[in-house]
Image: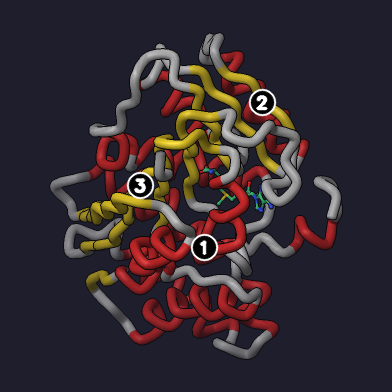
Amino acid sequence: MSSGDLGEVSAYVHGYGEREAQRLMDQAESVRALIHHDTEFPPDSRILEVACGVGAQTVAMAQQLSACRFVSFDKIPQSVGLAAERVHAAGLQRVDLLAADLFETPFKPESFDVLFVSYLLEHLADPLGALTNLKALLRPGGDLLVVEGDHGSCYFHPDTPEATRAWKCLIDVQAGLGCDSEIGRRLHPLLQSAGFEDVRVSPRMVYADESRPLVQHQFVLQTIVPMVEGVRTEALAKGLMSPIEWEKGIADLRETGLSSKGTFCYTFFKASAKKSD
Ligand SMILES: C[S@@+](CC[C@H](N)C(=O)[O-])C[C@H]1O[C@@H](n2cnc3c(N)ncnc32)[C@H](O)[C@@H]1O
């Protein structure tokens, strides 16, 4: 299916609007240190960033690994255009961007030292097929870095029934598309099944309370709540909640990142692995 095909576009659970683009930027920024403080590769490594979206991770990674060379691609040309603007605005010289589908890339086999994948596998019906396909692009001995969430790892306070159900809608709507939003916990066996070696998984927990106002604001209010709000139409169409229950659920979720009594916890999973020599 071509990059601009609208059937594929609508299959992405969070959509491709401006709000989602901003949400991805807020998500990357809010957990940047937590996820990437220990990300390092040798100078001049050729890094392939798969499904770069609007460039949220591209900018963070390329700033941190300024001696490496990046090729970043996404199947949506409009997203790649936004990513290019951000990369240009950040003054990053060593990043090439293009539109491509990961199942039909234009790259030569074994032409990259590193593959970087973030928040992608949870949106694919065939994550194993994707990893197997991508592995062919990695040189023998090359590195894979994957960052994914796990929506089953989330708990919060106050946990009203409506807030809990609204959160669960996110998982159920994504499952209805044949995707697994709880993929974080499966990364180790998944990467092993794809034939990678030396698989290591590191859980990264985000925790927010009043003493961490930036995390409350950037992560809970600007990343999490908009992500749940984004499945409103599908959740109501499926009859998972009534409109009144839904509005209360969203308001209650917002409270977990707003009130002095609110707390919120979520775990990301960062996996590294190698392709055999
Ligand atoms: C949640 S976004 C993550 C974007 C980016 N990695 C980030 O962390 O901000 C998922 C991205 O995967 C892209 N995507 C999904 N299927 C793809 C495919 N087959 N080939 C390339 N990109 C794909 C979508 O277009 C979307 O931009």
Task: State the residue position of label 3.
Answer: 273
Residue 188 horizontal side relative to residue 124, left or right:
left
- Rendering coords of residue 18 (x, y %): 66, 43
Reading the chain from its start, which is encountered first: label 3 or label 1?
1
The one nearer the camera, 272 or 38, is 272
Q: Amino acid at mark 2?
A: Leu
Is residue 170 visible in the rendered structure shown here?
Answer: yes
Q: Amino acid at mark 3?
A: Ala
Residue 71 horizontal side relative to residue 260, left or right:
right
Specify the color scheme.
Answer: secondary structure
- Rendering coords of residue 146 (x, y %): 42, 48
Mark 1 vs mark 2, CA separation in Å: 23 Å
Q: Secondary structure at mark 2?
A: strand
Task: State the residue position of label 1.
Answer: 122
Q: Quadrant of residue 106?
A: top right
Q: Amino acid at mark 1?
A: Glu
- Rendering coords of residue 169 (x, y %): 51, 78
Task: State the residue position of label 2.
Answer: 97
Residue under the point 45% across and 60% down: 225
